[in-house]
Image: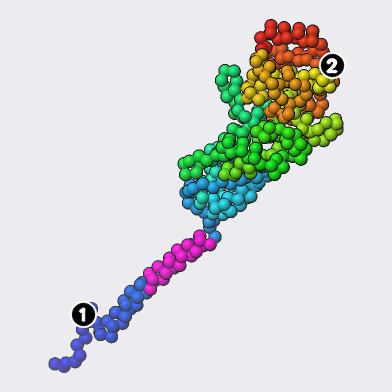
Amino acid sequence: MATGPIDVYPGPQDEPPSRRGRQRTRTRRRRSGGILLLAVLLLLGAIAGGGYYVFSSVFSTPDFDGDGTGSVIVQVKPGDSTTQIGSTLTQRGVVAGVQAFNEAAAEDSRIRSVQPGYYQMRSRMSGASAVALLLDPVARVGQLEIRGGVQLDDTSAPDGTVALGVLSLISKASCYTVDGNQQCVSVDALRAAMVDTDPAALGVPAWALEGVAKADPARRLEGLLMPGIYSVEPGASAVDVLRSLLAASDTRLEASGLVSGAQAIGSSPYDVLTIASLVEKEAITPDMPRVARVIYNRLGAGQRLELDSMVNYPLDLQALRTTPEDRARPGPYNSYVVAGLPPTPIAAPGAEAIKAALEPTPGPWHFFVRCQKDGTSCFAATFAEHAANVAEARANGAF
């Protein structure tokens, strides 16, 4: 029987060595490829993450976190835009940058209603926190309102009610809080600044220097702070506060026509201011021009003014009438004893009172009395007419 090679179908276990080697090589390549792909993906992820970090670091808006700390006083000036407010906050270290503030402000249109003045902010605030605090009334500091007829000193009514005077109002407006403690310029410090500082150095207008020089130093600024809204810088000295207020008031007094108007009628601005203060204390607005005429008529005739407001002024008393004892008390403000104008204004006169003093209504009146409960006065040219008006006033319960 013939013999020869026997062909056997090779199984896996019988795979030729060369083929098994090629298969292991392909397996290793696939495994290496997978690892490489994973490494590439991880690398790309790291690059992407780093790129985002770099992008956000370079191109995102710098901003602080949170509500900030400490206390920073900032001023919003008249006409400041949102960007200008943001610039001020940035310079004072309140926010990280103008853009952070502007982006937060863009989310709240109320930012356009922020009024000029001083605001108590904090250091390192986020833009959103800074916007929110600016819009919170609690942040507003240094706001002073002077009303017509207010005196420098506090006054008391017959029932014991006390009305704050200009010095007390300034002191109150100067207050702000540092580390939980309130700090204010005291009334005593303001009074000392008024008394001890040269009036010209304090900013008293040139047209008032002569009158102020003759006044009691404790009353020398009476009437020179015109009614209106002012800003008092918290933390400023008493001298700086008064100087700032006098400068602002001088601008308003000039705008009222006081100086040019006084020159036009041949009078001094200080005398017109003094007359306006009497008108402010004695009359409601519709009656002011006629009350001014009574004052001019009596001054022209050499008559005593006999105004109760003048008598009550040095007594720091807020009352419609006077007592016989007070009318007998000697002094330069006692209009029942001395003739002429008082040595200073007796209150802060407003624009309407100044206008009345510059443009009194023509008329023959020498007397007036408050004859209606709403403050309306009745006017008379003779004493007999005046006596009848007084009787009417009593019947009306006007005083």
Question: Residue at label 1?
Answer: 13
Q: Secondary structure at mark 2?
A: loop
Q: Nearer the viewer, residue 256 or 337?
A: 337
Say whether disc 1 or disc 2 marks the residue closer to the N-terminus. 1
**The N terminus sits in image quarter:** bottom left
Residue in the picture at 69% in, 30% down: 348
Q: Nearer the viewer, residue 335 or 165?
A: 335
**The C terminus sits in image quarter:** top right
The rendered magenta stretch, by its main secondary structure, is classed as: helix
For disc 2, the neighbor class at 10 Å (few under 14, some 14 to 19, many from 20) is: some
Residue in the picture at 54% in, 45% down: 121
Q: Is residue 370 visible?
A: yes
Q: Nearer the viewer, residue 343 or 345?
A: 343
In this picture, residue 54 sits left or right of residue 173: left
In this picture, residue 22 sits left or right of residue 100: left
Depicted 341 relative to depicted 111: above or below: above
Question: In this picture, which residue range is highlighted in magenta?
Answer: 36-58
Depicted 242 relative to depicted 361: above or below: below
Q: Residue furthest left?
A: 1
Distance from the alpha carbon under mark 1 to that under mark 2: 140 Å
Which labelled disc corresponds to residue 364?
2
Which labelled disc corresponds to residue 148?
none
